[in-house]
Image (tube, rainbow, N blue to C red):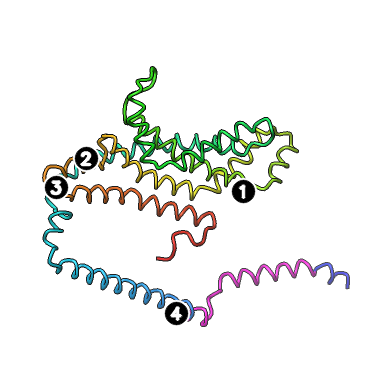
Amino acid sequence: MSSVHSGGPEDASAATSADSSLSDEGWAPSTHQRERTAYRRSRAVRSAAVSAASTVAVVVALLWVLTSSPGWPRVRWTYFDLDKAVASFPAVLSGLWLNVRIMVICGIAIFVLGLVIAVLRTLRGAVTYPLRLAATIYVDLFRGLPLILVLLLLGYGAPALRLSGLPTSVLFWGCVALVLSYSAYVAEVFRAGIESVHPSQRAAARSLGLTYGQTLRHVVVPQAIRRVQPPLLNDLVSLQKDSGLISILGVVDAVRAAQIETASDFNYTPYVVAGLCFIALTVPMARFTDWVARRQGYQGAGGHL
């Protein structure tokens, strides 16, 4: 009896491993599972076909209504002149390169300044009240002022002051206006991320001997930035579009280049070309934002196409 009992576990483990190897090698989906998979595949194909057909039908109907209208020839010449688009494209593309550089440089400055303001707004204690008050006033001020008004005040007013040590370039002051306005919004995004970190994270870090600054740097801020990546990317998309507002200061970006091309014959096709260039930049960024949001668990990001 004892010999049988001692050999039992070895025999059982051997039988279990043999059964698992056989099941792994010989497993196949059941007939019901194959039918269900085939049904789902057929439904997906049918849905895709219906979506494509309905989209084509709607587009064709809209094009027919548009091209058959009495004023279509004038509209086509004013907004969709192919020759004008080809002629203006190099100038618009050259101006778009300036918009891209503005977005990159201002985006970095906005990130840093917005994070500093958010940290100042989340400081605790009576001693730091003046810093919190200054950060709050800053955020309220530049969120309340229209961006175009800040551009006019700094773009035209600051160079006229001729302050020693500061540039007089309208491009520089236009970038400053973008940074000041957007950093107020980004600061609130960062503040939401910082305050979303559970207080136990701070308590655990302090119990390990980390100072307040080390807790912010190594524990709180990294988690906050990770949590607010989608709204930060949305602000970057918006910055890419709003960089075109700097054209009101006379800077030759994509919008200003389109305006110059339009002034010769009042054909507005260059504006359409500039708009398509901006769309070519912002749509991939928007889809990347949705992808990042889905990776972080935002199941509704991007909607349903």
Above or below for 35 versus 123: below
Circle 2 residue: 257
Q: Nearer the viewer, residue 231 or 40?
A: 231
For the magenta stretch, what is the residue range? 8-35
Which residue carries the number 3 mark?
266
Who comes first in sequence, dot 1 or dot 2?
A: 1
Main secondary structure along the magenta-highlighted residues: helix
Question: Residue at 70% across / 34% down in the picture?
Answer: 210
Q: CA distance from mark 3 to mark 4?
A: 57 Å
Give the foreground label among 3 and 1.
Answer: 3
Distance Cα–Cα, label 3 vs label 1 = 52 Å
The amino acid marked with disc number 3 is Phe
Residue at the image point whose x is 24% and y is 38% from the top: 94
Q: Is residue 297 above or below residue 265?
A: below
**Mark 4, secondary structure of its residue:** helix
Mark 3 / mark 4, whichever is N-terminal: 4
The reply to whether callout 3 and callout 1 are in contact (CB within 8 Å) is no
**Quarter occupied by residue 201:** top right
Q: Is residue 280 left or right of residue 121?
A: left
